[in-house]
């Protein structure tokens, strides 16, 4: 198959790539937020340790979530047909993910508003299960996009139960477990004392089994759902991202548990997530995550050409992105620099002032 049997306008490609970057950024940054929240009942042996864990992500978690909102907004503006089909067809799963995000946000904001221990434990449960729910649903969802959702050419016509097939569930499990490791490597970087040691022990115990799940997932993905379509043959990039994801995670585990290089361990785990998400998005190029019936003309199917806004709209959006995206990136980088110090239970007061 030729590399580009069906030519795609340049601005359509640009905006697909920009939306892909937003999703990659979201999962890299929000991945460790999800992981830390899911680890609260596992690594936090008492309230002080759990407060340390929450404080490591406290200054930045809501900023990381903005990447999700921006990805959704960019999809709405650049590919309105993609947005409308995705959000109407997948309303219930997306609602479930949204509820999870709301529970987590409420938990972080209200956890310390009352001195009662039961109050704090309740919101810890909200944070843990909210993060778990959102992560699982997003993992299942993106795996389904990589496979290709059933449709009649314009609208999704599959079943809700059909979304939870074996490979999709494997993707959900992978997202949950990989984000747990990502959160633990972040805690080794951002904490000292007991929390630091608990996080390192978690990576040492569970890192290699997660690497095995990741290997199984990317191998099956490339063997059974190769990244090839009438829009592009991206088989080689698909395998490259697969190998990079596994190698980077393995290197992260060695750096964190053997070499005690927490910074490299965290970065390499992030690279693994970036490679994994990139591999999923590679399969969405052109078809936008929807199975294509090649017996129908391109104009009668939902794809990167038919779902896009007008050239004028995409041009205006491109200029806006060129101006404002660097400003946003610079601000977020600065915020991470400001809150870059490690914390421990010694930094947490015994009593919270209300």
Image (cartoon, rainbow, N blue to C red):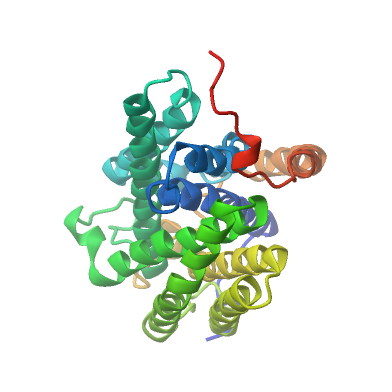
Left or right: 202, with 256 as reference point: left
- Residue 256 in percent (x, y) is at 62, 70
Compared with 183, 278 (above or below) is below
Compared with 237, 309 (above or below) is above
Q: Residue at x 48, y 31 (%)?
A: 108
Q: Quadrant of residue 205?
A: bottom left
Q: Is residue 24 visible?
A: no
Left or right: 259, with 51 as reference point: right
Compared with 109, 162 (above or below) is below
Residue farthest toward the top in the current orientation of the protein: 354
- Residue 60 in percent (x, y) is at 63, 38
Left or right: 10, with 278 as reference point: right
Q: Nearer the viewer, residue 75 or 136?
A: 136
- Residue 296 in percent (x, y) is at 36, 67
Q: Is residue 214 visible?
A: yes
Q: Residue at x 66, y 74 (%)?
A: 255
Q: Residue at x 28, y 62 (%)?
A: 150
Q: How many callouts does the rendering have?
A: 0
Q: Nearer the viewer, residue 214 or 41?
A: 41
Q: Nearer the viewer, residue 172 or 289?
A: 172
Q: Nearer the viewer, residue 75 or 189?
A: 189
- Residue 305 in percent (x, y) is at 54, 57
């Amino acid at each position: 198959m030729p590399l580009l049997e069906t030519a795609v306008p340049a601005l359509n490609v640009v905006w697909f790539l920009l939306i892909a970057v937003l999703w990659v950024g979201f999962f890299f940054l929000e991945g460790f937020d999800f992981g830390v929240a899911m680890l609260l009942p596992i690594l936090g042996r008492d309230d002080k340790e759990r407060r340390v864990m929450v404080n490591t992500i406290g200054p930045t978690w809501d900023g990381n979530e903005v990447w999700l909102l921006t990805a959704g907004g960019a999809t709405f503006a650049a590919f309105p047909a993609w947005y409308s089909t995705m959000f109407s067809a997948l309303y219930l799963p997306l609602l479930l993910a949204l509820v999870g995000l709301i529970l987590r946000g409420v938990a972080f904001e209200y956890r310390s508003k009352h001195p009662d221990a039961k109050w704090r434990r309740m919101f810890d449960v909200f944070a843990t299960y909210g993060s778990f729910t959102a992560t699982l649903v997003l993992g299942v969802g993106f795996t389904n996009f990589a496979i290709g959702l059933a449709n009649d050419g314009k609208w999704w016509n599959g079943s809700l139960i059909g979304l939870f097939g074996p490979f999709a569930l494997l993707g959900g499990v992978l997202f949950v477990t990989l984000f747990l490791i990502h959160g633990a490597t972040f805690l080794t970087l951002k904490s000292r004392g007991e929390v630091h040691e608990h996080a390192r022990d978690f990576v040492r115990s569970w890192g290699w089994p997660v690497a095995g799940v990741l290997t199984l997932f990317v191998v099956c993905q490339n063997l059974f759902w190769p990244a090839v379509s009438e829009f592009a043959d991206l088989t080689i990039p698909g395998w490259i991202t697969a190998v990079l994801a596994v190698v980077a995670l393995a290197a992260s585990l060695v750096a964190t548990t053997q070499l005690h290089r927490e910074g490299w361990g965290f970065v390499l785990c992030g690279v693994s997530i970036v490679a994994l998400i990139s591999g999923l998005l590679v399969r969405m190029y052109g078809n936008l995550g929807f199975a294509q019936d090649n017996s129908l003309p391109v104009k009668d199917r939902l794809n990167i050409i038919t779902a896009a806004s007008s050239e004028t709209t995409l041009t205006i959006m491109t200029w806006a992105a060129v101006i404002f995206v660097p400003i946003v990136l610079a601000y977020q980088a600065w915020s991470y620099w400001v809150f870059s110090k490690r914390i421990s239970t010694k930094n947490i007061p015994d009593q919270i002032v209300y």
